[in-house]
Image (spheres, grey):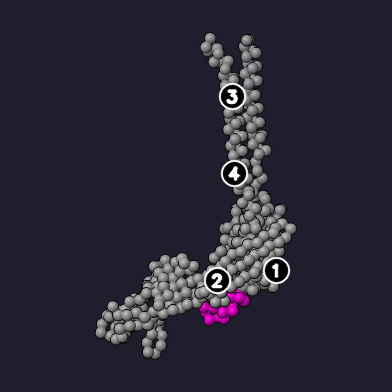
Amino acid sequence: MSRSSRGQIRVAEAFLSAFIIFSALAICSALSPPSNVDNQQALAAQGMRALIQLDSDGTLTSMIAQGNWTALSTALQLLLPLGVSYNLTVYDENMQQINTISITNGNLIGNVAAVQYLCASQSLQYHSYTLRLQLAVVK
Amino acid sequence: MVKSNRRGRSGQIIVVTALLIALIITSTATYIYQLSSNVGDSDQYTLNDLIDSIELGSTHAIVGALANITNGGQNQTLATNLNEWTTAVGQQYWIGKFTLDYALGNTSPYTAGLYISWGTTGIGVSEAYASFQLNGSGSEIEMQHSYEVNVSSSLYMEAHLTQNTSDIEQVAVWCNLFNNGQPALAKNLTIYYRESTGWIAPNATNNYVLRDYGNGTYAAFFNVETTATSLDLSAHIFDLRQILVQANTTCLQQ
């Protein structure tokens, strides 16, 4: 075999190797699952779980009863993943909005997931509240 | 000759290596994809989350009622709270329409869902119990779920009386508080001793010292001016949920 044809074979082999690896990478990129954070249902589930966690020891209704909206907003910010913006509205038994300030960490842009949460207070006087939490991924 | 063969094969080795690398990349990607798919499944459990939230609300309604009742409220508060809670659940619409029914515990030791025993043997119990049936129906769901909620606060009290001087007795009281069987912290604890004039809470004049062990165990020490060989004591504890539980005991001089 002449030197020039051997060189051409080497080049062809190098191209073949590169083709194989790039094909594998292409297959992998096609396999990538959609991001969970982008999924509205996943966002709603995360919001629901954040509220359940806050409600588990009565902290949620305690903050609502005290009108401590800043603490509630801070707690939500800590419990929700980074890059998620939210807007919470709290209603009393008569569906009257009771939060006097906005409980939010920014504007909701894009696909918005919504969670409705009902909770009861542990206080001596019974109260129930309906919470509407809207969530979106910050783009 | 051997050298020439090696040179000839080196290109094939590159291709085989590339194939191996490609295999590793695709298998790793497939593995990660499968893992990600499993994580994705957990996001579908919103119905379970919903049920959890309704159970939590039921528990809180009972805790509030028991706190109210032990603080002097009417026994009917338990049913009133649960009526309001079940109505509130019925008025909501999530992924379907839900109805929540409850039944107050009526088998011994409960009466109308309550068991409040503040006895004289050093044991006090404040407890409430109800069972629930949650039904959900809608275009996406058809479900039934039953659960029980038991809320209790128990106090175990033990006391010793030791003669300090001829007319001063030193009292040592140990209290253990439990919430649903687990050691729990108290929000407020008051010890009383009985004198001819009535129940008295010891204070600084009695050298009253309260020790909190941080695990639901509390010890109180104080002096009482008396020549009696026994003393009636009462402990009143509010747990962190504001449920009051009392226990009474008579301690004898050691």
Sequence-wise first label, 1 or 2: 1
Do the residues indicated by labels 2 and 3 lie within the same chain of the protein? yes
Q: Outermost residue, left direction?
A: B166
Q: CA distance from mark 1 to mark 4?
A: 39 Å
Return the residue at label 2.
B129
Sequence-wise first label, 2 or 4: 4
Three-letter amino acid code of the residue under disc 4 = Leu
Q: Which residues are magenta?
A: B67-81
Return the residue at label 3.
B16
Q: Nearer the viewer, mark 1 or mark 2?
A: 2
Give residue B35's mark: 4
Q: Position of residue B44 (x, y in %)?
A: 65, 53
Q: Residues within 10 Å of mark 1 (few under 14, many from 20)?
A: few
Q: CA distance from mark 2 to mark 4?
A: 42 Å
**Residue at 36% in and 80% down:** B250
SS under mark 2? strand
Give residue B91's mark: 1
Q: Quadrant of residue B162?
A: bottom left
Sequence-wise first label, 3 or 4: 3
Q: Position of residue B38 (x, y in %)?
A: 61, 46
